Image (cartoon, grey):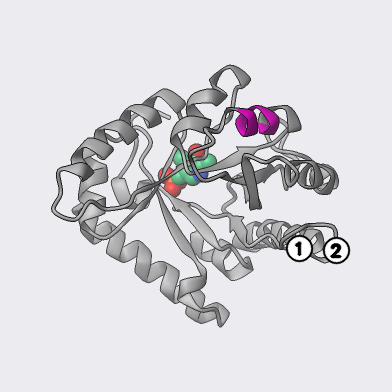
């Protein structure tokens, strides 16, 4: 495994190349580095290579890492402004630390959890930026709102004062078949476009969180605006 800085550089090149092939501006795609299961030292190495946005799946692990990195950042000559995204499944009884510590949540899939996050967001912080997780390919064991129910959820979520609705997140079943993967990613992009065309959102959704280490190129081709990349930056995880 090459150093994290080298891996990051390679992922950025992949994103640029995918943008170029798709005729897109490379600045239209944000790289989220998924640091789950890796310790603060891995995050620090990525920050030193210019990465500021990080994704975490597990609430307690994420909160601990956010605290460790805040201490580290405060000791730097120019403290970097890190941005933390919660991308894992949400449980109602663990929503408070998410509302208190993260900047973004990608995995909102029901109104009840959105309401709790909104209520629990400390008023002195900027509103929590949220994406609705959509079960785009209908996988049976997955969280995510059904595409047909996404507009209703979006309309309810956009009224919650502690949240800003930014877009959609998808986590499709991995497939070796690139054409099929691309088709699934395109369905997500079409859903985002349909919601924006409904005329019922206060502000257009500008975020499509889609694509991981294996399929980020296809996701960018289909119109992703944020890719969530773990393995290709930090290496293989020893646990899920
Ligand atoms: C772990 C995870 C990722 C990163 O996956 P890699 O294949 O390691 O890039 C992205 N999104 C979610 C929701 C994840 O749980």
- Rendered image: mark on residue 190: 1
Q: Does the magenta segment cover residue 210?
A: no
Q: Position of residue 122 (x, y in %)?
A: 52, 32
Q: Is residue 234 visible?
A: yes
Q: Where is residue 234 in the image (x, y as percent from the top left)?
A: 30, 46
For discs 2 and 1, the disc positioned in front in the rendered view: 2
Residue at 56% of width from left, 25% of height from top? Answer: 95
- Rendered image: mark on residue 4: none
Q: Position of residue 171 (x, y in %)?
A: 60, 45
Tell me the crowding category of disc 1: few under 14, some 14 to 19, or many 20 or more residues within 10 angstroms, Cα based. some
Q: Which residue is under mark 2?
A: 199
Ligand 1 under 8 Å from disc 1 Cβ: no
Tell me the crowding category of disc 2: few under 14, some 14 to 19, or many 20 or more residues within 10 angstroms, Cα based. few
Give the dominant element type of the magenta stretch: helix, strand or loop.
Answer: helix
Ligand 1 under 8 Å from disc 2 Cβ: no
- On the picture, is 206 further left or further right than 237? right
Is 194 situated above or below 34? below
- On the picture, is 152 further left or further right than 3? right
Is 15 situated above or below 118? below
Residue at 34% of width from left, 32% of height from top? Answer: 37
Of label 2 and label 1, which has the lower sequence position?
A: 1
Residue at 47% of width from left, 31% of height from top? Answer: 100
The furthest residue to the front: 124
Where does the magenta region start and end?
A: 114-119
- Labelled pair 2, 1 in contact (Cβ < 8 Å): no
Image quadrant of residue 106? top right
What is the secondary structure assignment of the residue under circle 1? Answer: helix
What is the secondary structure assignment of the residue under circle 2? Answer: loop
């Amino acid at each position: 495994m090459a150093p994290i800085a080298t891996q990051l550089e390679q992922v950025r090149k992949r994103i640029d190349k995918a943008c170029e092939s798709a005729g897109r501006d490379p600045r239209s795609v944000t790289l989220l580095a998924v640091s789950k299961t890796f310790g603060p030292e891995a995050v620090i190495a990525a920050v030193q290579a210019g990465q500021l946005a990080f994704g975490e799946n597990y609430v307690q692990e994420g909160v601990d890492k956010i605290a460790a990195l805040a201490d580290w950042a405060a000791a730097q000559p120019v403290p970097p402004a890190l941005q933390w995204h919660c991308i894992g499944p949400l449980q109602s009884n663990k929503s408070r630390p998410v509302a208190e510590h993260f900047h973004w949540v990608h995995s909102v899939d029901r109104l009840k959890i959105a309401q709790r996050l909104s209520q629990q967001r400390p008023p002195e912080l900027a509103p929590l930026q949220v994406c609705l997780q959509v079960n785009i390919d209908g996988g049976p064991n997955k969280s995510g709102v059904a595409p047909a129910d996404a507009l209703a959820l979006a309309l309810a979520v956009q009224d919650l004062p502690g949240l800003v609705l930014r877009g959609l997140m998808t986590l499709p079943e991995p497939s070796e078949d690139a054409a099929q993967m691309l088709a699934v990613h395109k369905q997500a992009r079409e859903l985002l476009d349909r919601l924006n065309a409904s005329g019922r959102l206060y502000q257009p959704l500008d975020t499509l969180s889609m694509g991981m280490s294996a399929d980020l190129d296809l996701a960018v081709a289909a119109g992703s605006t944020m890719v969530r990349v773990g393995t290709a930056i930090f290496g293989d995880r020893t646990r899920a």
